[in-house]
Image (cartoon, helix red, strand yellow):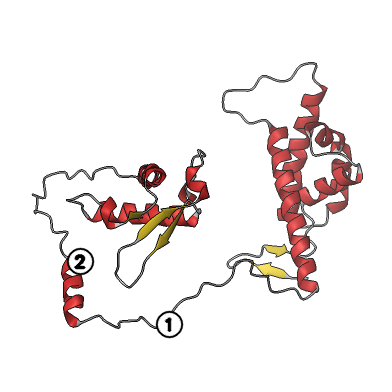
Amino acid sequence: MAIINTPGSDYTIHTEVYEGPLDLLLDLITKAELDITRLSLAKVTDQYLAHLKTIQQTSAVEVSGFLVVAAKLIQIKSEALLPRPPVREEGEEDPAESLARQLKLYKHIKYTAKWLKALEEKGLHTYIRLAPPPVIDTEIDLQGITIHNLVEYLKSLYRFEEDAVPLTSVVTIPRRTIKNKIQDIIQNLRKVTNLSYKSMLPDKYDRIEAIVLFLAVLELVKQQYAQADQQSLFADIFISPTDKTFQDDEIILALED
């Protein structure tokens, strides 16, 4: 039995043979072959209360957890016997729905724990990689790159200089979203089959504009709405359409999931 001791207290968690109030309640419903509903919670209340008499010798901390669930079950059963459902205050949660939701979540967690334990007992500690590993060059090919090229590239990093403004002024950053930029690229790809990254930048663009455009291209490539090609290091990036480019489905960004 694996036991976890919480620092600073005597409370222990029995991870392999845990027998708590939700575990008992789930076992009663399962044996009765009932679904986790308001009705099933009311039906097993008497059996749950009968079990409380057998745990008198356990610690007060553990018994308190059983008593809390028992109080909820009594309330649920009493409400089920009423001729009409009780009227609740605005924002007041239904105890039956709350307990049923907790029980369903507990059932899912317990099933997953048993599944992981079965894999561990079989010695299955590894997982198959479905996607092929990416091919990454260990060395950067700098053939044909001179010191002058590096100097010019370094200068380009500092060309986004902006006039200094007083500290008391409020600078409003123009709203440029990746989603809007994606829509612009899609519309252009449906008209022109080949676009370059630099050609899509405005004449007087800033750092934010360049970053948003780059992230939009990455998202399109990731979701296979476009293909990107770069012939050499630091060269321009060319974007071409795929079959998905001409679909009307709205693109869902990964950051929106």
Q: Residues within 10 Å of mark 1 (few under 14, many from 20)?
A: few
Instruction: Give above or below for 245 relative to 221.
Output: above
Q: Nearer the viewer, residue 118 or 218?
A: 218
Question: Residue placed at 77% from the left, 53% from the top?
Answer: 20
Task: Check disc 1 and report the residue beneath it.
Answer: 138
In the image, farthest residue toward the right: 32
Which part of the image, by quadrant, shows the N terminus? bottom right
Question: Residue placed at 75% from the left, 55% from the top?
Answer: 110
Q: Nearer the viewer, residue 234 or 92?
A: 234
Is 145 on the left-hand or right-hand side of 16?
left
Question: Residue placed at 74% from the left, 58% from the top?
Answer: 112
Is 53 on the left-hand or right-hand side of 227?
right
Q: Position of residue 190 (x, y in %)?
A: 41, 43
Q: Position of residue 82 (x, y in %)?
A: 79, 20
**Which is more N-terminal, label 1 or label 2?**
1
Q: How many marks?
A: 2
> Tag 1: residue type?
Thr
Is 149 on the left-hand or right-hand side of 108?
left
Secondary structure of the residue carrying tag 2 is: helix
Q: Check if mark 2's residue and mark 1's residue have beta carbons within 8 Å.
A: no
Residue 60, can we see it?
no
Q: Which mark is residue 157?
A: 2
Instruction: Give above or below for 221 relative to 3.
Output: above
Q: Residues within 10 Å of mark 2 (few under 14, many from 20)?
A: few
Q: Position of residue 120 (x, y in %)?
A: 76, 72
> Tag 2: residue type?
Leu
- Give the alpha-carbon distance from disc 2 to disc 1, as whole Å: 25 Å
